[in-house]
Each structure stands twice: as structure tokens, then as C-alpha cells.
Amino acid sequence: MTQKRATPTIKRRRVGAQLRRWRGEMRSGDAARLMDWDTTRLSRIERGLYRISGEDVRELCKKLGVEDQAAVDEVAKVAEEPAGSGWWAPYASLMSPAYLDFIELETEAQTIRIQHPKVIPGLVQSHGYVREILSHARTTTEATEPMVTVRLARQEVLTRTSKPVQFHGLIPESAFHARFESGPGLMKDQMRKLLDASQMPNIKLQIVPLTAHPSYGSNGSMTIFTFQHPWTPVASVDNPMGGSHTYDLEQVGYLETEFDHIASIALPVDESRDLMNEYLEGLHK
């Protein structure tokens, strides 16, 4: 039976990448023969172009000598999950594939670290701030409200009762000086949102002060995800098309070091909270 070509969703790419890591130094042709496959089929599975069943994941891992059964079971489970299944599915036609991938990574992450040089991170944006930002984005008027709904729905990862994500956000103080057509009340609501979020045990917010050298964070925004075993971290870098994602451990490590570098000069959590209170009270102009 001919294997159907599948859309290379983020799930299939991650499953394929993990199988490639488990193959290790074994040649792809030798690994393919273990399953009576041709090399092309294995290559496309490892690149996420072909779907692999959970049963085949277990069989291949057994023949590769993978002893971590919990990890194998996790990969097999994800391999069986249907593509495009999630709360975001009704909005998929409005979003780029890269943004859909980002939402899926965000939903499955155990920890999220994000740094943005200009705006407040989406997971802690207030309703008014979200609408203001998206209403000026390059999108149709008809798409604005659904996209507002999507961004607000994403925030559920911070408050879900089952394993809320651990979130570390680096926020530029310059974002507090934005002027919006709807008036100063919008930023007051946003500041209240940040202060409420800062009280949550799974959220760590640090402000990058105006006095910080402009080299810190000048290379753009980044998001770093970590996941349960055996999945490796993924890093995402924003761009107008929705961002690009990397699984390369060296690249992810570089961005993790960059994040820590910026965090080292950001205000500590308590001082950041004090500064947000000062902005809320109108002590900074």
C-alpha cells in the first residue's frame, strides 16, 4: 500500500526529528531495512513529510534498541494525534502555517521564555491592548475580531488547572510609553493585567529598563519553549510571516544564552513590580 504524503505539521516534524535522534549514527538505509522500508520513506518520515503510526514508532524503536519506554510511548501517542486538532482549528484559515505551529508549541510547552524589544508579550496582553495592536496589523477588518479571540484564547496556558505553563517574560519599559487612540485608560488596564499576572506563582516578569544599553534585545524578539521528556527545546524568532522555528540544539542554546544575557540586566521581579505600580499610579510620564 502506498504511503500518502502528509502535510508537514509541527507534530509530524517533531516525531520525525525524535526518530532521527534515536537512529543516531546508524545509516538511514540500514534503519529503513529494519522495517522493510526504502530509504526514501524513512527520510520523509524523519522530515515530517510522511505520517508514521504509533505501532510503527514502537516497532522501529524496538529494532533501534531504544530502551526508554516512556519516551517511546510519548512519541507514539503524538504520532497518532490527528493533524490540525485543537481549539484553534476553526481559525486555521486566517493564520499562517508558522503561526499555527507557534500556537501548537505554546499549548504543549512546559516552560515559555519570551523577550520582545518593543511590545508587551501576547500571553500577558490585556483585551484592549490586543485589539489595539491587531487593529493596526496588516490584516483584513473581518479577520481582526477572530484574531483577537485567538490571542486571548492562547492565554489559557497560564491559568489552566492542569499543569499551567511556567512563563518568564522580559518586557521593555519603552512599551509603557506607547500612545493609543483609545486614550491612556488602555495602558492603565494593561498595567493592571501585568500586575495581576506578576502575582501568579508560575509567572515571572522582568522589565528591561529604559536605561539599558540598546544592544540588549536589539536583534529582535524570541520565544523559547521546553517540553516534557523526550522532546527537545524549540526556539521561535518573530517575523512578519508568523515566525520561524528551530530545533537545532546549537541554535536554541545560542538563543537561550542571549535570553539570559538580557534577563541579567533586566530589573529583578520585585523591582519590576514596583515600577509597574509607579506607571499605574501615573508617576512616570
Image (cartoon, rainbow, N blue to C red):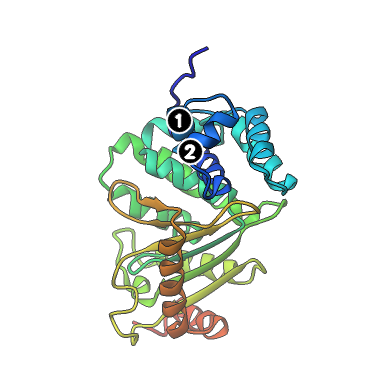
Query: Which residue is identified by label 2?
Result: 28
User: Looking at the image, which is closer to me, 212 or 143?
Assistant: 212
Identify which amino acid the numbered label 2 is placed on: Ser
Vertical relation: 74 (above or below) 284? above
Report the residue at 43% width, 56% height from top: 248
Q: Which residue is mark 1?
A: 39
Asked if labels 2 and 1 touch by Cβ distance under 8 angstroms, the answer is yes
Q: Which mark is residue 278?
A: none
At 52% from the left edge and 50% from the top edge, which residue is drawn? 25
Q: Quadrant of residue 54?
A: top right
Looking at the picture, how far across and down is residue 128, in whole percent? 42, 55
First in sequence: mark 1 vs mark 2: 2
Q: CA distance from mark 1 to mark 2?
A: 6 Å
Residue at image x 30%, y 85%?
213
Q: Residue at x 48, y 46 (%)?
A: 103
Q: Position of residue 250 (x, y in %)?
A: 43, 63
- In the image, taking residue 78 as reference, residue 247 lies left or right, namely left
